[in-house]
Each structure stands twice: as structure tokens, then as C-alpha cells.
Amino acid sequence: MSDGASCMYGFFRFGLWLLAAVALGACRTPEPPPETPVSRAPFLLTLDEVARWTPDSALAEPRNVSSVPLAERFVDARSQLDPRLPAKARVLVAPDGIDGLANHLDEQATFNLYTFTHWSSIDVLNWFGGTADLNVSIPARPWVEAAHRNGVKVLGTVFFAPKAWGGDIAKPAEFLRRDEHGAFPYARKLVEIAEYYRFDGWLVNQETDLGGADSPLALGEAFLAFMAYLVEQRPEGMEIHWYDSMLPNGRVKWQNELNDKNGRFLQDGPLRTADAMFLNYWWPDDMLETSLATATSLGRSPFDVYLGADLWPGRVAQSIRRVPDWLDALGDGNGGPAMSIALFANNYNFTYRGGDGQPAVSTFADDAEDVYAFYRSGDRLFGGEDGNPAIRDPAGSWPGTGSRIPARSVLTALPFTTSFSTGHGKMKAREGVATPGEWHDISAQDILPSWQFAVIGAPDTQVTFDFDRAYEKGNALRIDAAPRSGAASVPLFKTSMEADAAEVELVYALSPDYHGAYLWLETDAGGLQEIPLEPTDGAWVRKVDVAETAAGGKIIRIGIGLERGELPAATLHLGELSIRRSDAA
């Protein structure tokens, strides 16, 4: 990463917090998480360990093998909040130093660990990490399973550090070693490791300048050959990404655009050297045109190019606090971006402790009671200034990536059941009976609402995850209606499910004397079925009904409605939603 672009790469895992802060100057290193993650194998490997790695060696960990296949996704204009949005652009998130936050295999006894819920708004999770000595960062199984359940790919990272951070030319030189047949053993190992653990590919982030080598140009060309070989070796569906850093001459010089200097690391004549390129962050608007033109000249889609967006609040390249209009520069003229987007340090809402005259986004990492600030900031990143992706934000304010790229969904078949679990909690509930005790296990996360949280109509309607009440696991979904409010619609799930005569079951709790709430199902034929929700005096009740779709018809959206009228303030909790074939009940 360019100077000042990454704050950590795992420095804190080795107790070098103060040294890292001094060495990186403007970067502000996060405090250690409440529970220290594993900082070695199986999650972080030296090159020597990669060379010795086999599935039956002590370096491999069977418990880190994902058991959840990558779900198939769809985008359907009929169920989008804005049907005009094109769906070609992809979104990658790269939580900075996630290997120092989430290297856990087992459930943790702490609520306020890092988590993520906006899977429908992204396409790729990059496990962004590594150090000068630990060059290969392998994703943790619970995160791979949560991502795959939502159709999101997960990439590990190969990282060679800048010399200022301990980078050594000998490391990339060793990485490029060929065997007696001219093949690249490390490329084969990378494919073998990804296939064994069942994640989806690699980002190669080569930031060690090779200028001190005997022949930087030869090493640069060798890296091109390595990348072409890696792409050739990877199985179908596995993705190989290149970070915009080193040039073919072996020198590190971030281009911030795709151009004739770095383009060979995407496409080298007839050779595909990467499936995508993650561009550095210092791009003025005119660089976007260069990137588009270069992608076209290389015969590649512009959506193979990810415009890097550095979200860290203390930096100004694309900080959503200081430069809220950068997303507009990516427009293709049709409402969507002209290229894909890589959101770097989207975990700023967890790790940023304040500075440069800006307060912390949340203190959730230190204070579990600040959980709602943590979630609000995530909603704002994808939903815009007000956190509501159904509303276009005023000019000059942050619009949210959801205003440019439609939500994706995996909900295409029955049965579908969700208890709205975010994968952590301050207690655990079973059928409404809660047992106190903090926990965190992102692999226990359910499929969550496609839009977090869209409200159409009455703007004073509030939607949140509620960690003080749950029917199952650690939270419920809470909807608060203001008194005497206008009508509101809360779209929750984007679906494409054949549901003729399917049974719909909702466990909910509703304030007394409130007779204006209903569950709605929208069909592909344009129908809208409303299932009234009677007051429950706040207790959990179970509502069962039958979906009214035509034979072969599909449910394309599911949501909650609140009627207009002289109604009191009310709170509606959703504990569990299930749709299944009636003969499977």
C-alpha cells in the first residue's frame, strides 16, 4: 500500500504498537482487540512455511476448512430500490489488518469484536493483511462461511512490505523461484492452499521496491510470468487480483490508474496476468478516463478495474467524511459507476480512535454499549448520509454506494428461514428464552436484510438490530414507529422464490393498541399480499399464513408495512421469519 495508505499490516499482533505508530507517522495504529487473535499458522505463513505446506502437515488446520459453498447470486431490476441502476460494477471491501481482528475458529466469549453485515452490498471480501515476515494471509473459516452463505467471494493476500516497513528483496526473489521444469512452485502452493481451505483466490500486493537487486527489470518480468502462470493454474471460479504498486521494471510506483505502465499486470498481450487490478487511491477525475481507455485497449472489461477508495477518516483521498462527493466522479452517465470499487479500511468504524480533529466513529471496540454507533456508521457507508438507501441524499453529502450499485441476493429457493442474527450478542436466546453471556461467531450469522435499512415513506420510522432482545441467537430486528406518523414501507429481502401456496411464518412482538402493522410479499406479477400483524402486548407470538402467488409465480420482495393514521408510537420486533413449502411444515 502507498505511503500512509495502510496503518498496520498486523504490527500490533507482535506488541510493536508504539514502534509502528512512530514508524508510520501519520498512520494511527488501532488498539489491540479485546481478545488477541491467532497471529501465526494456519492464518499467517512465512514463505518458508508456504513452501513446506501440505494438507497433512502441521501447518494445515482442518478446522479452518469452510463447509459452506459459494451461493449463487442474482440481480433483478424489478426488485431493486432503483430499477434504473446497472448491475455490472462490483464492490470489494478490504478491512485493513483484518488478520489482526478476526483470526478465530471458535466462538469467542466477547460481544464487541469486529463484524460485518452488509453482504448484499459487496461482491468480494479481501482478507487484507500480512507483515514483512508473514507474507501470506489466509482467511478465517467463520468469515468465509458467512461470506459464501451470501454469495460473496473471499480472497487471501500475498504481501511483500515496503522497505520502510522491513521489506526485503530476498522475499519476492524467493517467491519467484522456478523449479527444474520452469514452473513456479509458490504459485502452485497458493492454488493448493486456497482449494484446501475453500476460499476464492488471492490479492498479490507486491510493495517491495526491487531497485537494489542485481537486475530489477529481470525480477519485474519474472513477476509478470509468475502472475500469468498463477492465473493459468487457478481453477475456474478462483480469482487472482493484482495491487497497483510495482511496475514491470521492478520499481514500486503507484499509478492510481490503469495505464500503459502497469497495464501488463492485468493483461500482457495474449496473457491474462490477473482477473482484476486494485488501483491505488490518489486519482483525480482525469485518471478515470485513462483507466477506462486502457482497459478497452487491453481488451478487458472496465469492471475488471477496481478504483481504490481509502476510507480511513484521517486521510483525505476518498474519506467519506472529508470528501463526500468522490463517488460522483465514478459515474457512467446512467446512474452507476463506470468501474468497480475497492473500499479500503471499511473497518474504520471499529478501529479508528479519532485524531486529526475528528472524533472516533464509534468506541465499540472498547465499549460494547456503543454498538449502535458502530452499526449506524456501517449503514451510512452503504446507505448514504442518513443510512437509508431508499432516499437520495442531498448534493454535497455522502450518497452511499447503494445509491449507485443495486443489492445482490441469494434467496432463490425455499425453504428460507432467518432469525436476523448478526452473529454476536450479549446473550443467547432459544425460542424467546435468553441466557446471559457475551458471544461472537460470524459463521452463525443468518441471511440479513438486503437493505440496511431502507424506509420508504415516514422518515421518522427507525430500523435497527436490537441486542437487548432476541427470539433466537443474539438479537432481533426492531422497527420503531412514531406516533401519528405517515405510512411507511420497510423493504427487507430481495428474493426470487417460487412460492405457490408456500407457508409464511413470522415470530414477532408488537406494542399493545397498535393495529397498523403488516408483513407484505410482492410478487413478480405485480401483486402485493398484506398479512396483518395484531398487537401482542409485547410478547412473542407466531403468525402463520399462506403465500398468495400464482402457479409458478415468484415472491420478489418481502417487507414490513406501517399504515398511516392516528396511531400511537409502537415498537415491532421481528424474531424469526420462515417461508417453506406447506407440505414441509
Image (spheres, grey):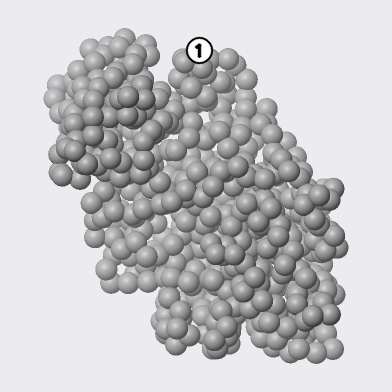
The spot of residue 377 in percent (x, y) is: 47, 45
Residue for point 33% across, 33% down: 462
Residue for point 57% across, 21% down: 427
Q: Is residue 470 above or below residue 126?
A: above
The spot of residue 130 in percent (x, y) is: 73, 59
Question: How busy is the neighbourhood of tag 1: few (under 14 within 10 Å), some, or many (20 plus)?
Answer: few
Quadrant of the image for the C terminus? Answer: top left
The spot of residue 275 in percent (x, y) is: 54, 71
Q: Is residue 17 left or right of residue 336?
A: right
Q: Is residue 38 above or below residue 176?
A: above
Q: Is residue 249 visible?
A: yes
Q: Is residue 97 visible?
A: no
Q: Nearer the viewer, residue 382 or 153?
A: 153
Residue type at mark 1? Val
Q: In the picture, residue 174 is in which quadrant?
A: bottom right
Q: Nearer the viewer, residue 335 or 53?
A: 53
Residue for point 30% across, 15% down: 511
- Residue named by callout 1: 433
Query: The residue tagged with tag 1: helix, strand or loop?
Result: strand
Q: In the picture, residue 89 is in which quadrant?
A: bottom left
Q: Is residue 408 above or below residue 63?
A: below
The spot of residue 35 in percent (x, y) is: 72, 36
Q: Nearer the viewer, residue 443 or 281?
A: 443
Q: Nearer the viewer, residue 310 or 258?
A: 258
Residue for point 57% across, 83% down: 271
Q: Is residue 317 above or below residue 506?
A: below
Q: Is residue 326 left or right of residue 273?
A: left
